[in-house]
Image (cartoon, grey):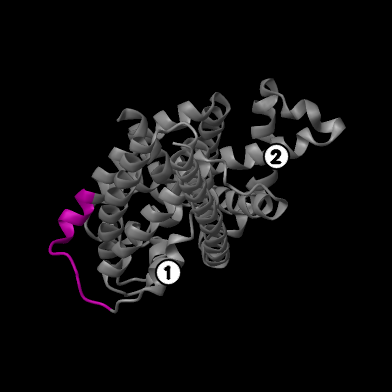
Amino acid sequence: MLTALKVTFLFIGTSIGAGFSSGREIALFFGDTSPWCVALSSVFIALICALFLVAGKYDLIPNNIAVKVATFFAGAVSLVSMLAGGEKILSDLTGVSMLGIIMTLLGAVIVTLGIEKIKWANTILIPLLILMMVLIFAKLGAPVYEGSVSILKPIHYSGLDVLLAGMVLSREGKKLSGKQIAVTVTGIGVFMFAILFILQNIVLSDKMNSSMPVLGVSTELNMRGVSGVLIASAIFTTLIGALETVVVYVTEFASKITKLKPLAERKNKCFVVLLSLLIFYPVSFLGFEKIVDTFYPFVSLSGIALTLFILFKVLVFFIKKSKNISHLKFNKKALG
């Protein structure tokens, strides 16, 4: 149970970064649609997670150059948006610039220590993050249910985290039993439903069209500090997930070039982490809002394409497996 819970929080922590927790990506993908439409995304997200966990368990995740480039790009986009978002939220809350570097360095330490430390960080921070959201939601009053309903927007949004969180999940699928996968997927569906419903209500309450709607609404409710903790926690959990993904692919790339092979050694992971941050930190200067609005829709479409490809592979695998079992039973019956 604890293993499944940690994997659940690993996915949520990797997914709900600056764009999510600030409400920016919710406003971008859904606008003023009904919160039920947003919550429908949780169903699609849970199904996609199930697909990636099963595909990971049976080694069906494609490993070609196109997938690697797309996943690396998604990790890089997430990383630079977290770097930009972290700097923005800490600067807005304190009035002091460059505090985001402290968060970044702490994330670098956790990534260097390995995936288990990342899981524990998520397991501690995600419940805190959910509590902060509930507090803001409760102070808003009655929830909103009105708005248009679309099936395409939830599908489009559900592909956003596939290239990053989905690929992280697939690596965990090899370690989980069928029962643990079922518990993990159920947990992801329940948590995402609650969080998305709450977030859309907060976004719909933002009358100032803020770049970070959650921060704007919480300021009006005199809960700016609570909102700041919420967004900073979410940024941090996603930052470490995105940085881990980038480091994995940089290490793999280095392992194939003779002169760079030393970088692929475990003892040099700290250097690779710092090198990755050195490369991508300047990109974050483009600004949080611009990074989210420009790159997130493309990452989402790429995630949907990858999901469809993996779905095809999984279906083919189980059809062949079913035929083999039927053939084996037929032979046993014929011999018996």
- Residue 148 in percent (x, y) is at 29, 79
**Residue occupying the far left of the picture:** 142
| SS at mark 1 in the image | helix
Exactly how many numbered labels are in the figure? 2
Q: Nearer the viewer, residue 182 or 153?
A: 182
Residue 67 seen by the camera? yes
Q: Residue at x 63, y 46 (%)?
A: 281
Q: Quarter holding the N terminus?
A: top left
Is 146 a magenta residue? yes
Amino acid type at circle 2 is: Val
- Residues drawn in magenta: 134-147
Front-most of 51 and 145? Answer: 51
Rendered view: 117 above or below 309: above
Task: State the residue position of label 2.
Answer: 250
Structural crowding at the residue carrying mark 1, measured as other residues with C-alpha within 10 Å and reported as few (<14), some (14–19) or many (≥20):
some
Give the residue at x 46% y 27%: 117
